[in-house]
Image (cartoon, rainbow, N blue to C red):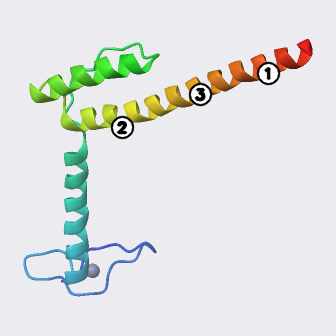
Amino acid sequence: MKCKFIKQNGQQCEAKAMKNSNYCFFHSDKKQRKLASQKGGQNRISKQKEPLEVVELEKAEDIKKLLAKVINEVRSGQTDVKVAHCIATLSNYFLKAVEVSDIQNRVEKVERVILEKKTIY
Ligand SMILES: [Zn+2]
């Protein structure tokens, strides 16, 4: 029996199928690899079932409270580790943005003071 694999050009594979299989060695292996990768993909999907509540985030202090809450939720099994990992990563970006924004505000204040002094003299 010929391998049942249909190539990208629409033609059937010419190779002989393996014993107890509809596919040749190469395509049977490929099919199994595809199934394995699909299974892996499903395992990577988050197990978080209920949506988490919306939290107001404005300052570093808010992230500190959020992380403390998430740490406890992970420890008690209420929050999926992958979700927690994502929150931690995003928190890191948020804190960096807060830091940059703070520095920008300070620089603007200093620039204003310098400009005011220049106009006085
Ligand atoms: Zn084949």
Residue most extreme to the bottom: 15
Nearest to the observer: residue 45 or residue 26 = 45
* Of marks 2 and 3, the one in the foreground: 3
Q: CA distance from mark 2 to mark 3?
A: 22 Å
Q: Which mark is residue 103?
A: 3
Establish if 52 lies above or below 38.
Answer: above
- Give SS at disc 3: helix
Nearest to the observer: residue 120 or residue 82 = 120
Residue 18 image point, x, y percent: 14, 83
Asked whether residue 2 is in view, the answer is no
Q: Are marks 1 and 3 in contact (CB under 8 Å)?
A: no
Nearest to the observer: residue 45 or residue 116 = 116
Q: Dot 2 corresponds to which residue? A: 89
Near mark 1 (Cα within 10 A), the count class, few <14, some 14-19 or many ≥20, is few
Asked whether residue 87 is in view, the answer is yes
Residue 96 image point, x, y percent: 48, 33
Looking at the rendered structure, the kind of residue marked 1 is Ile
Looking at the rendered structure, the kind of residue marked 2 is Thr
Residue 83 image point, x, y percent: 26, 33
Q: Are marks 2 and 3 in contact (CB under 8 Å)?
A: no
State ligand 1's quadrant: bottom left
Q: CA distance from mark 1 to mark 3?
A: 16 Å
Q: CA distance from mark 1 to mark 2?
A: 38 Å
Return the disc, 1 or 2, that comes first in the chain's sequence: 2
Looking at the rendered structure, the kind of residue marked 3 is Ile
Q: Dot 1 corresponds to which residue? A: 114
Return the disc, 2 or 3, that comes first in the chain's sequence: 2
Quadrant assignment for the N terminus: bottom left
- Give SS at disc 2: helix
Return the disc, 1 or 3, that comes first in the chain's sequence: 3
